[in-house]
Each structure stands twice: as C-alpha cells, then as structure tokens.
Image: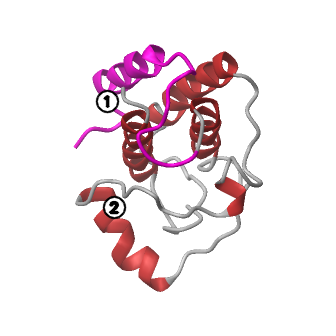
Amino acid sequence: MPTIRNETDRTRLTERINKLTGDETPLWGKMTAEQMMSHLVQGGELPFEASVPDRSTFMSRTFIKPLILHVLPMPKEVKVSAEMDQQADGRKPLGFETDRSLLIESMKKLGELSVDHKCLDHPFFGKMSAKDWANIAYKHIDHHLKQFGV
C-alpha cells in the first residue's frame, strides 16, 4: 500500500503536485485547484493541530476507518465538515504556490515521523498512529490529484 512514509511514493506525489498549474478544472466536485491545495494543507495539519472538533462515532472508528485505510478507495463527493470545506469555514488559500510548498513540506514532516510519534486523533476516525496518518494522507492527496487530472 502506498504511503507518504515511503520516500519513493512521496516523490511521485510531489511530481504530480508540481504538474498542477492552478488553472485545472475538477473532474468532480466544486473546489478550485487553489481551494483543493489549501484543503490538503489543512488536512496535513490535522495530526498536529486540533482545528476540527471530534465527530467520530463508534461506527466511523470501528468499521469505516479500516475500510478507508486499507480496502476502499477514497469516495468522491463526500460531504466534509464546514471546518474542512474550503467553500465554507475551511482554511483560506494563501496562494497556489505558497500552499503547494506548504503541502510538500507537510507531506515530508508527516512521512518522516517516528512510528511511535503521538499524533492527534482524526476528527472522523478517532485514534490514529503516525503510520495510519501517513496512509490516509497518501490516499487523500492521491484522491484530490486525480480529481484535478494529475
């Protein structure tokens, strides 16, 4: 399974991120490329900064988390909380190039964490290890890069 803990996987994601110009039209969803980049930066902060309240449930922690982490692809058109929605209360873009750099930095930071690093809980999946965060980060970034055709 690809993960940003693997330097080769992280490099491949970085190459795809660097192909984006900011002018791409999404294949699904309503975000612009700039909003998507900001959304991914915000997602990369979640293991370290509590910016979204815990909305996890027994079902999301016990059944949905392992399916998303290890089995199913990231689903399209999932309604996210207002705090993670760049068209609502999500993190505002700082500019495409700035956010691109911040995303690449956050991938490296999360990818190089020690396996025993204590990360914050995921707002939907609950407790997650550094390895889990790296796996979901890869899937999340890959999902949005596909959304914008790279």
Residue, disc 1 = 6
Q: Quadrant of residue 72?
A: bottom left
Q: Is residue 7 visible?
A: yes
Q: Magenta residues, as a range?
A: 1-30
Q: What quarter of the picture does the N terminus occupy?
A: top left
106 part of magenta stretch? no
Residue 106 in the image, given as x and y percentages of width and height: 57, 31
Q: Identify whether 125 is placed above or below 14.
A: below
Residue, disc 2 = 68
What residue lies at 51% left-to-right and 36% top-to-bottom? Answer: 110
- Per the image, label 1 sits on a secondary structure element best described as loop
Q: Quadrant of residue 80?
A: bottom right
Residue 101 in the image, given as x and y percentages of width and height: 61, 19
Q: Is residue 15 left or right of residue 128?
A: left
Q: Is residue 4 visible?
A: no
What residue lies at 50% left-to-right and 66% top-to-bottom? Answer: 127
Classify mark 2: residues with Cα within 10 Å, few (<14), some (14-19) or many (20+): some
Question: Closest to the observer: 138 or 77?
Answer: 77
Q: In front: mark 1 or mark 2?
A: 2
Q: Residue furthest bottom?
A: 58
